[in-house]
Each structure stands twice: as structure tokens, then as C-alpha cells.
Image: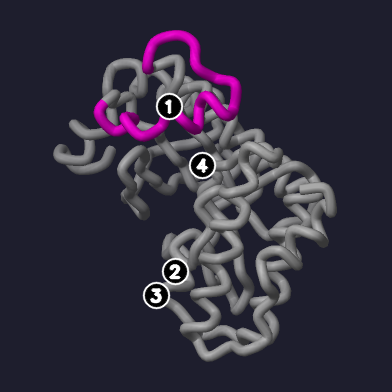
Amino acid sequence: MPKSKVFSHVFDEETLKNVNKLQGDGYIGNLLGPIGTGKESYVFYSENFKGRVVAVKIHRHNIDTFKAIPSYIRLRGKNTGGFIKKINDWTRFEYNFLSKAFNIGINVPEPIRCYENIIVMEFIGAEGRPAQPAIKDSDFDSNEWYPQIIDYIIKMGRNNLIHGDLSPYNILNYNGKPFIIDFSQGLKLSSLTKSFLVRDIDNINKWFLSLGYKKIKESQEIIRDIDENL
């Protein structure tokens, strides 16, 4: 089990029960790490009963970390119940978006299991070392990455999916290929959520401009490729 400081931040009684359930079902073993931290969640790695290394994302049952979340929950149509139920609903929503992205051919971690506030997914990395975010590992070909990431944005948009927080911090560089992670702020595409799509596109364009890439597509052109009626 992780160190005591992390333990106190993440593992309340309900979360410990959920971890034990997933361990008993063979989806995970001992948790190692963490390999990633954020305001709302920690990511660990583990081995399942088949010996496959998996990533384990745990959304913290801490109401203080969710003060900025209600607007997203309202846009998702999820604004009922206590804060633990909201966190669990939020986790399920993220898992469903990750699954949808995986099923339409986006480079994302393969979703394996969602239980309450925990997502088990493919570990992107090798020998227990996670792939690095592109902001830290820029050893890639921008001429390949930019059109591929824009294609992912378009493909997700055509399937009514917005990442909601797309940036080089949420794109892993694994073997020279981009893998999109963290759909925790994902939204269904509509006229109400279009601004989040524009923000994702602008984030990617600014990033590649900073890398010296010149063949940038304007956000409105990309949006027209998704849906001319937006």
C-alpha cells in the first residue's frame, strides 16, 4: 500500500472497501506508486491476477477538491445525491467517455473496469515506468502528431465527445505516439459545450505554435469539419 501521507489523502473507508472489492475480483493486486497526482485523483499501478500491469485511478472522496465541479456535473445532467455519489457518478462518466474514445479508435488507455470511484485501465509505459506527458517529453515529429491529434478531436466531436481539458499535460508520448489521457472533464458536444471544444483546439494550436509548427488549422475550420451546424 502507498506511503502514509498518500494513504491519508486517498483512502477513506469507502475507497478501501472499493479497492478490496477490485482486489478480490482479480482486477488489481497491491497498489504501487502513485505515478500521477491531481487535485481530484491519484493514479497508481498494479498487476491483475493474470500478471498484466494496469493503471488504477482513484477519485478522492473529498468534497473540498470538488468545489469547481458542479458546472460540469450540471452540463452532464448529473447533479443529484451527496458528494460521494457525485464523485462516483463523475468517475463512471469518465470511464464511459474513455470507453467511447477507445471504441472509435482514439489512442487512449484501454478501459478495463470501473467500480464506484475507481477506474482500472491499461498502463501506458514499460517495466513499471509510465510514459511521460508530452510537455516533458517532446521527442516526437510534429508533422505527424499535429494532424493526428486534430483528427482525434474531429473524430471525438463527430461522436459527440469533447475531452474538455486537452493539453500537452494530458497527452502521453509512448514510443513516439500520442496517447490521450484523463477524460475527467469530458463533455457531450452541444451548442452549450462548444466553448470547451474551442478551448481544446486552441490549447493544441498554441502548443504546436510554441514548438515552431506552422501548418495550424483555425478552430472554426476544425469545428466545421465536425458539424457545420455548430
Q: CA distance from mark 2 to mark 4?
A: 20 Å
Q: CA distance from mark 1 to mark 2?
A: 30 Å
- Give coordinates of residue 135: x percent, y percent: 42, 73
Q: CA distance from mark 3 to mark 4?
A: 22 Å
Instruction: Kindly identify which residue carries mark 1.
Output: 70
Instruction: Kindly identify which residue carries mark 4.
Output: 185
In the image, is residue 82 part of the stretch drawn in magenta? yes
Instruction: Kindly identify which residue carries mark 2.
Output: 132
- Asked if labels 2 and 1 touch by Cβ distance under 8 angstroms, the answer is no
Task: Write down the region rendered in magenta.
Answer: 64-83
Q: CA distance from mark 2 to mark 3?
A: 6 Å
Residue in front for this viewpoint, 230 or 42: 230
- Asked if labels 1 and 3 touch by Cβ distance under 8 angstroms, the answer is no
Q: Which quarter of the figure has residue 144?
A: bottom right
Residue displayed at 40% across by 46% down: 43
Q: CA distance from mark 3 to mark 1?
A: 31 Å
Q: Residues within 10 Å of mark 2 (few under 14, many from 20)?
A: some
Mark closest to the chain's N terminus, 1 or 4: 1
In the image, taking residue 42 as reference, residue 97 lies left or right, namely right
Residue displayed at 50% across by 63% down: 167
Residue displayed at 43% across by 48% down: 45
Amino acid type of the residue that numbered disc 4 sits on in the rendered structure? Gln
- Asked if labels 3 and 2 touch by Cβ distance under 8 angstroms, the answer is yes
